[in-house]
Amino acid sequence: MDRTAESVLRQCVDTGASDVFIVAGAGISYRQNGNVTVDNGDGDAHLKPADTERLIREIYHMAGDRDMTALMEKGDDDFSFAIPGLSRFRVSAYKQRGTFSAVIRVVAFEIPDPAELGIPDSVIRTGEQAHGMVLVTGPAGSGKSTTLACVIKAINESRSAHIITLEDPIEFLHRHRKSIVSQREINVDTESYVTALRAALRQSPDVILLGEMRDYETISVAMTAAETGHLIFSTLHTIGASNTINRIIDVFPANQQRQIAVQLSTVLTTVISQQLVPTVDGGRVPAFEIMTVTPAIRNMIRDNKVYQIDGIIYGSAADDMISMDNSLLSLYQQGKITKDTALAYATNADMLARKLRA
């Protein structure tokens, strides 16, 4: 296999793939519209360990001769880099059965238009809030980073503010517009999310984007930041507002959970959950659950009645309070997805089936 890493990445961009997989024992593979396909174009379907090592060393060279020590010693390394005139790439390099492997995500230079992606205006408007905590949740690869990049771009173009992003790694690059945007990469510009978040509070921020809330210490500092008048955006790998709230509370020791529920009820303003679902024309489109925290929902969080929140969302007709199933129903009614797809991604398939029949 004599292809260069740059030719592999160029093919990924040219074919509209979202990811490329470099793993020994398999051919170079690409993910398009959610499906992984093997490229057998060079007649040699299987990468040997020497092939994957050569390709990955080329990628590290393109990333400014990045140090490979983390990959060698720990077996994992995440970073991003750009090829001028082509695209940006987010790399997750790792060892697999003792050999070098990598999954590389294509990240566009320009932040896309949210309307073209199907991101509702109510999601973009979360950036108009003065303070509080906004969470964007969903499984890996569901477009959370892109959604947040679109929100940050809208803030940057409309407000005079200091925006600090803490990411691992940085994906989208934001130019200074009306706002000043400080983008910090974990393990490159700072030690950890917690360290960077605590430092950010001394850097006169108005908006803080926290790439991921990984542990109770990070969540605790983030809630305190939201409590003290900052607008905090972050992500979790959960689906649904009630699951997200329970996940945050359950991260803490049992003797702190009551206090955390009360604190969360005061700082949380919006929970957005998203999934990418296959369309009838072979593409993918996002489906959203949006929960805007009302006084009634604050009381439910504080009084440990989180299980009642789903009913509030499901019964709402407002554009800033929509259930995942109603979002899927709307996509079906617009002819973008099939009935089977809507049911496959539904949170309450039986109830959605009744709506579809009606």
Image (cartoon, rainbow, N blue to C red):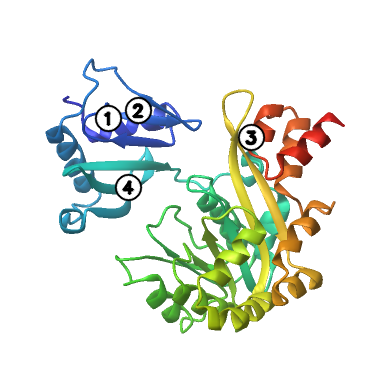
For the C terminus, the image quarter is: top right
Do the residues under discs 3 and 2 have CB atoms within 8 angstroms?
A: no
Q: Which residue is mark 3?
A: 344
Instruction: Please provide percent x and percent y for residue 62.
Output: 23, 45
Tag 1 or tag 4, which sits nearer the N-term?
1
Instruction: Please provide percent x and percent y for residue 38.
Output: 34, 24
For the N terminus, the image quarter is: top left
Is 7 situated above or below 306? above
| Rendered residue at 60%/36% (across/down) | 277
Tag 2 or tag 3, which sits nearer the N-term?
2
Is 39 situated above or below 237? above
| Rendered residue at 83%/54% (across/down) | 318
Q: Which mark lies nearer to you, 4 or 2?
A: 4
Q: Which mark lies nearer to you, 3 or 1?
A: 3
Q: Residues within 10 Å of mark 2 (few under 14, many from 20)?
A: few
Between the residue at mark 4 and the residue at mark 3, the CA separation in whole angstroms equals 30 Å
Q: Which mark lies nearer to you, 4 or 1?
A: 4
Tag 2 or tag 4, which sits nearer the N-term?
2
Tag 3 or tag 4, which sits nearer the N-term?
4
Q: Which residue is mark 2?
A: 11
Give the number of the disc on residue 54.
none
Between the residue at mark 2 and the residue at mark 1, the CA separation in whole angstroms equals 6 Å
| Rendered residue at 54%/55% (across/down) | 149
Give the number of the disc on residue 91.
4
**What secondary structure is found at the residue carrying circle 2?**
helix
Q: Amino acid at mark 4?
A: Val
Instruction: For residue 124, say whether it is visible.
Output: yes
Q: Which residue is mark 1?
A: 7
**What secondary structure is found at the residue carrying circle 4?**
strand
Q: Which mark lies nearer to you, 3 or 2?
A: 3
